[in-house]
Amino acid sequence: MAMIHEEIQSQIEKRRTFAIISHPDAGKTTLTEKLLLFGGAIRMAGEVKGRKAKKFATSDWMQIEKERGISVTSSAMQFNYHGHHINILDTPGHQDFSEDTYRTLIAADSAVMLIDAAKGVEAQTIKLFKVCSQRGIPIFTFINKMDRYGKDPLELLEELEQVLGIRSCPMNWPIGMGDEFCGIFDRQNQQIELYRKDGQSQSISLEGRGLKDPAIVELIGTSRHYKLCEEIDLLDIAGDPFDEDMIKQGQLTPVFFGSAISKFGVQTFLNNFLKLAPAPHAHNSSIGPVDTVNTEFSGFIFKIQANMNPAHRDRIAFLRVCSGKFERGMTVNHVRSGKKIKLAQPQQFLAQDRDIIEEAYPGDIIGLHDTGTFRIGDSLCAQDSFEFEPLPQFPPEHFARVLNINAMKYKQFQKGVAQLVEEGTVQTFRTADRTEDLILGVVGELQFEVFAYRLKSEYGADIRLERLPYQLARWTNRNTSVDPGRLSTLSSLCVTDQDQRIVVLCEYESTLTLLQRQNPALYFYSSPHEADIQNDLISVI
């Protein structure tokens, strides 16, 4: 047993599992591609471009992602680099797909925050940062696009502190910007990495010489040298010192500068990140923190994806391994159903490409074939039956009635709706008095377009969406009898969700307040999970 524990501990120390977060167009998927390139996972990095591009990003595997040039779903990728086993979770940057991103962050041990040097800290970055901050996830910052003109680097550091409320420690510093960008100065290793537009870089050690060396002045130019020395002196005097403990607590972010599209500074970032980023840690559960080494295999499902291989209409459940050693073919407890299931064909990913694996360790992301067994948030345990903390759920804010245009494709329509709903990015409701009415609820408006596109391309079902005016959904307490007629008004509609819970869709907050006043025995909750918790408490009382 001791040898097994030593093996698990050794494997855990090699693993780094992180998500990349940013506002759209900051270069997140491009950075992912370059990391895969340095890891030897791909031979040529694809840029994220529109429909005319011939080479697409590895992490953007859906057809709609290739056509639109955006990421609409999280991707999981693994590769080995310098003795480390790296799990990258590339998340959608667009706010309409933030629910997928939030859940994916639960499966990560750290986050890489990408910032566009020209735009600074943007809206979606703020939202994603808050999720990381609430969980105490260590955050590593890469300020991108230094080969273009943007904000002053000191101004960008000030934004991190003023807008996000996190202290920063620049690990390197840019020399120039835009057309005048010529490299970065590595503060810790005292060396300069020179930038070249052809993607080749050259490192020059300053050990024993320092920045004042005349050769450095000649190399980077007098004006850039003067500005660099002035800024480094300011950082040394007034900047936050490097503190590894604060970094691991998520209170200090190491900052790196570079250009993902030209891969400059990316490898430097990767090397430093692997030294500083935490190995997989204990996750909270119904029995407390689950020890990664001394607990038998356990994990949780954080994502379900239908049709990763359209030719086989397969469905994959993404599982984060939390403890112990996973082995192919092992039988585990499916805690929600109380049944035992065999995990026969576990897979690891490079986006859409997959390989069967024999074993996995804490921090790894593996794929399990799903025939309808799994739901997002499910816990799997080799022994015992504890459950990990529930994953966040968000109430939909946009609603539309779904109409199947082609009656001959009814079966395809039903199957497509059922499978896409189980992915967790959309929710369906039925009107309480007309069960044939299907209503779709989404967090972001663009999800409607993705839903319709995928039903057509993956299932052959054409639909028409009729927008509804409602802006919020609230679940009711199931312990109290509900008269649907009392909850359906000119600005509200009583419906049921996939699990037959009563839900009220409202146009305005004032509508909800009025319904509460008229129905004092009812309580309204923003998610089914919140409603279930309160209902259980009421039952106990």
Image: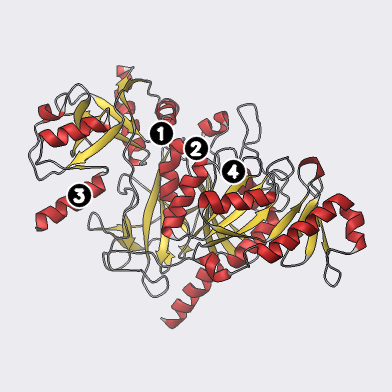
Q: Secondary structure at mark 2?
A: loop
**Residues tagged 1 and 2 counted as in contact (Cβ below 8 A):** yes
Q: Viewed as shown, does residue 70 lie left or right of 407?
A: right
- Other residues around mark 4 within 10 Å, as few (<14) / some (14–19) / many (≥20): many
Residue at the disc numbered 3: 532
Give whichever of 521, 536 is nearer the camera.
521
N-term mark: 3 or 1: 1
N-term mark: 4 or 1: 4
Residue at the disc numbered 2: 94
N-term mark: 4 or 2: 4
N-term mark: 2 or 3: 2
Q: Viewed as shown, does residue 520 lie left or right of 339?
A: left
Image point 48% across, 78% down: which residue? 6
Tell me the quarter of the picture where residue 58 sits: top right
Residue at the disc numbered 4: 29
Q: Which of the numbered marks, if any, corresponds to residue 409? A: none
Q: CA distance from mark 3 to mark 1?
A: 25 Å
**Residues tagged 2 and 3 counted as in contact (Cβ below 8 A):** no
Q: CA distance from mark 1 to mark 2?
A: 9 Å
Q: CA distance from mark 4 to mark 2?
A: 12 Å
Q: Residue type at mark 1: give it.
A: Gly
